[in-house]
Amino acid sequence: MIPGDIRFIGSSAMNNGCTAMVGNTENMHPANTITVCYNGSVGETFYQDRPFLASDDLTSPHG
C-alpha cells in the first residue's frame, strides 16, 4: 500500500469498512457498490459511493 486518498475497505464494522487510505490504483472496484464482509466482522455490509480497493475479507458483485 502506498499513501493516498482512495478508500481501502477491509473487514471492519466501523467507518464504512474503510481501514486505510491508499494511492494504489490496480484492481479498483467501481463506485455504487455494496460490500459484505465474510471474514472478521462477518456480515457487515456497506454502500461504497466512491471507487475503492478491498481486502480479500469481503465480497462485492464486481468481485
Image: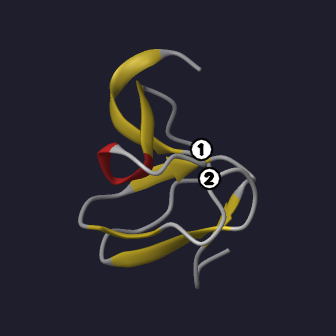
| Depth order, front residue of 10/1 | 10
Which residue corresponds to the image point at 51% horizontal and 15% vertical from the top-left?
2
Q: Which mark is residue 27?
A: 2
Residue sitting nearer the eye, 53 or 42: 42
Q: Viewer-proximal residue, 40 or 62?
A: 40
Image position, residue 3 (x, y; %)? 42, 14
- Element type at mark 2: loop
On residue 34, the disc is: none
Q: Is residue 40 above or below residue 58?
A: above
Mark 2 residue type = Asn
Mark 1 lies on residue: 26
Query: Given the image, on which type of amino acid does mark 1 rest?
Result: Glu
Q: Name the residue: 35% across, 21% down.
A: 4
On the image, the x and y values in percent for residue 15 come to 31, 44
Give above or below for 2 relative to 57.
Answer: above
- Say left or right for 4 vs 13: left
Q: Residue at x 72, y 54 (%)?
A: 57
Query: Which quadrant, please, contains the C terminus?
Result: bottom right
Q: Residues within 10 Å of mark 2 (few under 14, many from 20)?
A: few
**Residue 29 rendering spot, x and y as whole percentages:** 50, 63
Q: Residue 18 appears at what percent x and percent y?
A: 40, 42
Q: Quadrant of the N terminus?
A: top right
- Vertical relation: 45 (above or below) 21: below
Q: Secondary structure at mark 1?
A: loop
Image height check: is 27 above or below 8? below
| Residue most extreme to the top | 3
Q: Contact, CB < 8 Å: mark 2 with mark 1?
A: yes
